[in-house]
Image: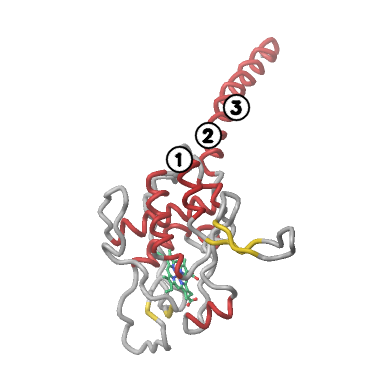
């Protein structure tokens, strides 16, 4: 078996009280939109979720308005095209999986909304997948449109290396090295899979703030209550 296990990386949102790096989420969306969206959908993510996470409401509205949505029927029973709204979901690159397979030598690019949770190794796996392409070892035959990646189970993947240094230019001026692009797009995909992440950890902290003193109080009261019998 040629498959490698991805080593652990120090993601800035991994600790029990760490929030996402929201500037990284914003850059990661730019990577997704300008690179991955050519083949991969994010069909569970609506534009309204961007608001106050990595865009202002006005920015998210402008972003949504860039897509064309088939809507209807209207009052006279006709279908029509309109610009996207906050309540719309991100557009699909292909109308169905047959079209997606046809465009990719038979391999279907999976939806990325929950990908960080769907694969063993999560963020670490995705990072090494995106940065781990290399020449196949001797004796490994690749099919049409396949590439060798030691982190992909079996090694032969139907996705060409999608990222390389300066494939896009970041709007915030961050140097777009291959590893930076990968880290940002995975942080973005971590957010799409766990949009509740920051709230969850904030609530966990509040819960601890109550539970720790309460436990201490219980212990003190128990000792006090039974002290006469000792
Ligand atoms: C598969 C991520 C860009 C085509 C995958 C998988 C991930 C992924 C996580 C699943 C691997 C697995 O099953 O474990 C990304 C990211 C991209 C990107 C983050 C942008 C940075 C692209 C592009 C294309 C593409 C631009 C098309 C030109 C595919 C295909 C597969 C795939 C065909 C299925 C491969 C197979 O099952 O053999 N991608 N991808 N991807 N991707 Fe991408």
Can you tell which quarter of the image residue 177 is in? bottom left
Q: What residue does disc 1 label? A: 19
**Farthest residue toward the top?**
228
Residue 202 circle label: 2
Element marked by disc 2: helix
Q: Position of residue 56 (x, y in %)?
A: 46, 41
For ligand 1, the image quadrant comes to: bottom left
Q: How far apart are marks 3 and 2 (CA)?
A: 14 Å
Disc 3 residue crowd, few under 14, some 14–19, many 20+, Cα 10 Å: few
Among numbered discs 2 and 1, the one appearing first in the sequence: 1
- Name the front one of labels 3 and 2: 2
Q: How far apart are marks 2 and 1 (CA)?
A: 8 Å
- Name the front one of labels 1 and 3: 1
Among numbered discs 1 and 3, the one appearing first in the sequence: 1
Q: Are marks 2 and 1 in contact (CB under 8 Å)?
A: yes
The reply, left or right, for residue 41 in relation to residue 173 is right
């Amino acid at each position: 078996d040629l498959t490698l296990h991805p080593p652990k990386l120090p993601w800035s949102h991994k600790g029990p009280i760490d929030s996402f790096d929201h500037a990284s989420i914003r850059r990661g969306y730019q990577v997704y939109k300008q690179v991955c969206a050519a083949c991969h959908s994010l069909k569970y993510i609506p534009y309204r979720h961007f608001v106050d996470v990595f865009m202002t409401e006005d920015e998210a509205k402008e972003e949504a308005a860039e897509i064309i949505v088939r809507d209807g029927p209207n009052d006279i029973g006709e279908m029509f095209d309109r610009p996207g709204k906050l309540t719309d979901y991100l557009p699909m690159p292909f109308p169905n999986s047959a079209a997606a397979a046809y465009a990719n030598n038979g391999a279907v690019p999976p939806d990325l909304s929950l990908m960080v949770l769907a694969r063993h190794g999560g963020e670490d796996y995705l990072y090494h997948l995106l940065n781990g392409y290399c020449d196949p070892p001797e004796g490994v035959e690749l099919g049409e449109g396949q590439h060798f990646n030691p982190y992909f189970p079996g090694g032969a993947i139907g996705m060409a290396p999608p990222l390389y240094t300066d494939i896009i230019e970041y709007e915030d001026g961050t140097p777009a090295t291959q590893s930076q692009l990968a880290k940002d797009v995975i942080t973005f995909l971590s957010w799409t899979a766990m949009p509740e992440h920051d709230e969850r950890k904030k609530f966990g902290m509040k819960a601890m703030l109550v539970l720790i003193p309460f436990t201490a109080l219980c212990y003190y009261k128990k000792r006090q209550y039974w002290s006469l019998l000792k």
